[in-house]
Structure formats: C-alpha cells, structure tokens
Image (tube, rainbow, N blue to C red):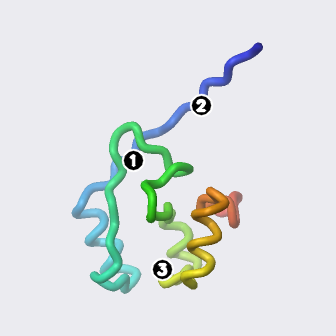
Amino acid sequence: MTSQVIAVISSILTCRDVVSLYKRYNISDSIPYVLPEVDDAACNPPLGYITIYEVHLKVGLHIQLAKELGEILRVLEIPMARLHPSAF
C-alpha cells in the first residue's frame, strides 16, 4: 500500500488582512470569520464555516450565500473552492 503525503501550506492571513478584505469587498461586520491555525487546511474549514479565497471575491462572489447552498456544501463536505477549482 502506498501512502500519500499531502502538503498543507499554512495561511499567512492576519487580522489586519481580514479587516482590509472586509473594507475592500464591502463585507458586513456581522459576518464572522475565523483565522486559520497553522495546521488548518482550506479543504477542511471549522464546523459551520466555509473557506473563501480572495479570488472568489475579486470575481464578484457575494458572501451572503443562500442558506440552503451553504448547508448543502457543509453536509456534502464540499469546499467552496471545488465549485470552480481552476479559479485560483
């Protein structure tokens, strides 16, 4: 049996970066965020959260996803990046 090693690149995002993104893309302060920990992977966000890449915001993704879509993605364990994987 061959084992696979998956490299996870840690995020370098800071609180200051998030504030800047919120301002740049007019994201409501009522939308919570969680900064990734060193060993977190974008493909496995914390329960109740989704991963958003800045490229999604650049192309016009609105953070206010339909509740049903968010729930479907969560239940099926599909990260947002999988909806358009070649976008980043």
- Closer mark to the observer between disc 1 and disc 3: 3
Q: Are marks 3 and 2 in contact (CB under 8 Å)?
A: no
Image quadrant holding the C terminus, namely bottom right
Between residue 34 and residue 25, name the one nearer to us.
34
Q: Which residue is mark 3?
A: 63
Q: Position of residue 16 (x, y in %)?
A: 22, 63
| Helix, strand or loop at mark 1 | loop
Look at discs 1 and 2 and give the one toward the viewer. 2
Reading the chain from its start, which is encountered first: label 1 or label 2? 2
Location of mark 2 (residue): 6
Between the residue at mark 3 and the residue at mark 2, the CA separation in whole angstroms equals: 29 Å
Point out the residue furthest to the left here. 16
Please tell me which of labels 3 and 2 falls first in the chain: 2
Q: Residue at x 67, y 23 (%)?
A: 4
The image shows residue 36, relative to residue 53, as above or below, that is above
Amino acid identity at mark 3: Ile
